[in-house]
Image: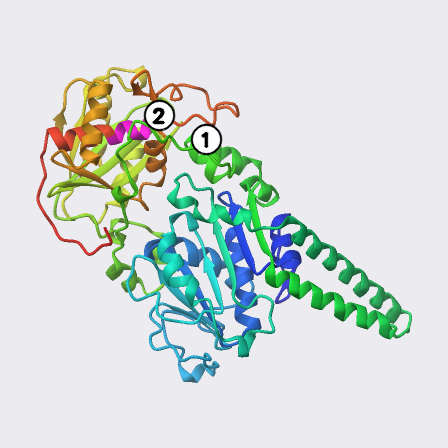
């Protein structure tokens, strides 16, 4: 496929979605690095260019994801195709009249959260955690990325009803009022809302579309051959061609195209080494859902049975994001400045889990009667505790109070990976100090009995203890998987999968290492408090 004289490679699924089927409703459930950004770039470019002056709703679960994931992954393709910022498109600013751009059909009152195109088309960036971005509009198309994080009820009540109107301008296009939804595989019931579209997809309609496209292409080929011989195509051929195109547009207009594809479908671009690296770096369940795109059953009577969706929150620091003014280079360098739930003047509580293959760090701050789980980190294989602490210190490099409260039990007093007499505790302590952080060591004693731990943490989730855990969903995606899939075996947390080799047969086992670090943080903050001051933040808890 060529765009502005530059050849663009599409994998088989991308080609089928965007050049063959082109259903009015497309739902793409695909693994990481499959190339969803390419699909969104193609889809939006078609709509923006072929419906001049139109309005698209670009829906994101929150501002942080919109600016660091959704928009950059799409706009980088536009740049590669020769569509340059402030020449062909702009974002966050009103295009000056000197640019000579056309006006949208409906005037834009505020361009602060708007992607503008030179032909007058605009895309409203809708952050579900930011009030006012889902304005009362009549959208001509709706684009949804990272759908597993979308609040489906808010989407159904605010966005879907706005996909209406403007038929007098664009009703002739089969893709008017089109919708693109993409995500990797969700692991929660709430995040699985878009999987229901598979029941709306009629495979026979999709096959009919492919058949019509094949026949139309055959006619085009025949016409080219006739003209090469100096023969005008007969009228019946032209009439048949028009009839096929009418039928094709009608089918595309009613079609729902639902796909579940893995990252491996983009193997030609990524290469086998990249897939192997993902397998090494990601916890097994994350690999299964986010790369292989497999549906995984969730433990409904698991170890954390009192945890609900109410224990998750979003906390975007809009002031910092706004100050970046859509400078995607700045936004790539992520830090705690993007988070509204961290008090920079207070210490951060941390807890770890130690394993030969994977090591976790979970960070939080207790405030009032809530324990805010701010962010979690993990390293695998050759990266160990020093690198893990380094990742934490890099993310929190702008944190004013460079002190951590390090909670640990007797497992931290063991020799680090059994190679010398240095303990895990000392490795971590020294790593923090080497990065310029002060450490308050809090020994919580022997590892708590599993049944006692189960009762304590579920009491915390139920609001029956001093602190209630609240987990930042954007900063703890892998931790949430570890927590939500932790089962019970013989009355204890099911940890049988932790020591199993990472093979194809065992990838379905949910590792609980991350949840163990979370447990230590909860126990430490609940039973051995060191920082309980209250602070107000602007957020969407």
The answer to whether residue 82 is seen in the rendering is no
**Which quarter of the picture shows residue 519?**
top left
Q: Position of residue 81 (x, y in %)?
A: 56, 63
Please state which of the two labelled residues, at mark 1 or mark 2, is closer to the viewer: 2
Q: Are marks 1 and 2 in contact (CB under 8 Å)?
A: no
The answer to whether residue 215 is seen in the rendering is yes
Q: Which residues are magenta?
A: 513-518
Above or below: residue 451 compared with residue 47: above
Residue placed under numbered mark 2 in the picture = 487
The chosen color scheme is rainbow
Secondary structure category for the residue under label 1: helix
- Indicate yes or no whether the magenta region holds residue 517: yes
Above or below: residue 236 compared with residue 478: below
- The circle on residue 280 is 1
Give whichever of discs 1 and 2 has the lower sequence position. Answer: 1
Q: Residues within 10 Å of mark 2 (few under 14, many from 20)?
A: many
Give the spatial CA distance, label 1 vs label 2.
23 Å
């Amino acid at each position: 496929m060529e765009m502005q004289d530059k050849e663009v490679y599409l994998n088989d699924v991308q080609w089928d979605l965007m050049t063959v089927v082109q259903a009015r409703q497309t739902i793409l459930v695909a693994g990481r690095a499959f190339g969803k950004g390419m699909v969104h770039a193609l889809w939006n470019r078609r709509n923006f260019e072929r419906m001049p002056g139109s309005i698209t709703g670009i829906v994101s679960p929150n501002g942080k994801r919109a600016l660091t994931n959704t928009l950059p992954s799409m706009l980088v393709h536009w740049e590669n195709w020769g569509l340059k910022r402030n020449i062909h498109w702009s974002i966050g600013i009103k295009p000056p009249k000197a640019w000579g751009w056309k006006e949208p059909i409906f005037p834009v009152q505020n361009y602060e959260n708007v992607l503008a195109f030179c032909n007058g088309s605009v895309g409203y960036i809708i952050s579900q955690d930011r009030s006012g971005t889902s304005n009362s509009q009549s959208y001509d198309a709706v684009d949804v990325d990272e759908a597993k994080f979308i609040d489906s009820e808010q989407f159904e009540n605010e966005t879907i009803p706005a996909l209406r109107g403007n038929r007098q301008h664009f009703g002739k296009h089969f893709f008017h009022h089109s919708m693109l939804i993409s995500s990797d595989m969700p692991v929660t019931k709430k995040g699985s809302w878009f999987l229901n579209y598979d029941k709306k997809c009629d495979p026979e309609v999709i096959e009919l579309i492919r058949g019509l496209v094949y026949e139309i292409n055959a006619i085009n080929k025949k016409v080219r051959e006739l003209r090469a011989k100096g023969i005008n195509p007969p009228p019946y051929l032209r009439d048949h061609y028009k009839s096929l195109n009418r039928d094709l547009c009608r089918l595309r207009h009613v079609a729902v195209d639902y796909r579940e594809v893995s990252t491996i479908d983009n193997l030609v671009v990524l290469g086998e080494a990249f897939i192997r690296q993902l397998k090494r770096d990601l916890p097994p369940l994350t690999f299964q859902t986010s790369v292989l795109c497999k549906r995984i059953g969730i433990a409904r009577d698991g170890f954390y049975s009192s945890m609900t969706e109410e224990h998750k929150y979003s906390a975007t620091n809009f002031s910092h994001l706004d100050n970046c003014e859509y400078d995607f280079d700045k936004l790539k360098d992520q830090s705690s400045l993007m988070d509204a739930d961290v008090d920079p003047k207070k210490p951060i509580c941390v807890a770890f889990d130690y394993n030969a293959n994977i090591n976790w760090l979970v960070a939080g701050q207790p405030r009032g009667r809530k324990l805010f789980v701010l962010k979690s980190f993990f390293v695998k294989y050759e990266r160990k505790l020093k690198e893990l602490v380094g990742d934490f210190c890099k993310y929190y490099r702008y944190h004013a109070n460079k002190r951590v409260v390090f909670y640990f039990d007797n497992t931290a007093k063991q020799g680090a990976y059994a190679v010398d007499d240095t303990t895990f505790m000392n490795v971590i302590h020294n790593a923090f100090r080497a990065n310029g952080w002060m450490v308050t060591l809090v020994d919580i004693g022997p590892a708590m009995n599993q049944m006692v731990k189960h009762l304590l943490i579920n009491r915390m989730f139920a609001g029956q203890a001093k602190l209630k855990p609240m987990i930042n969903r954007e900063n703890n995606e892998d931790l949430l998987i570890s927590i939500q899939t932790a089962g019970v075996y013989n009355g204890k947390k099911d940890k049988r999968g932790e020591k199993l080799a990472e093979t194809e047969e065992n990838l379905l086992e949910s590792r609980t290492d991350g949840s163990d670090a979370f447990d230590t943080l909860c126990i430490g903050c609940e039973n051995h408090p060191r920082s309980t001051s209250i602070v107000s933040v602007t957020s969407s808890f």
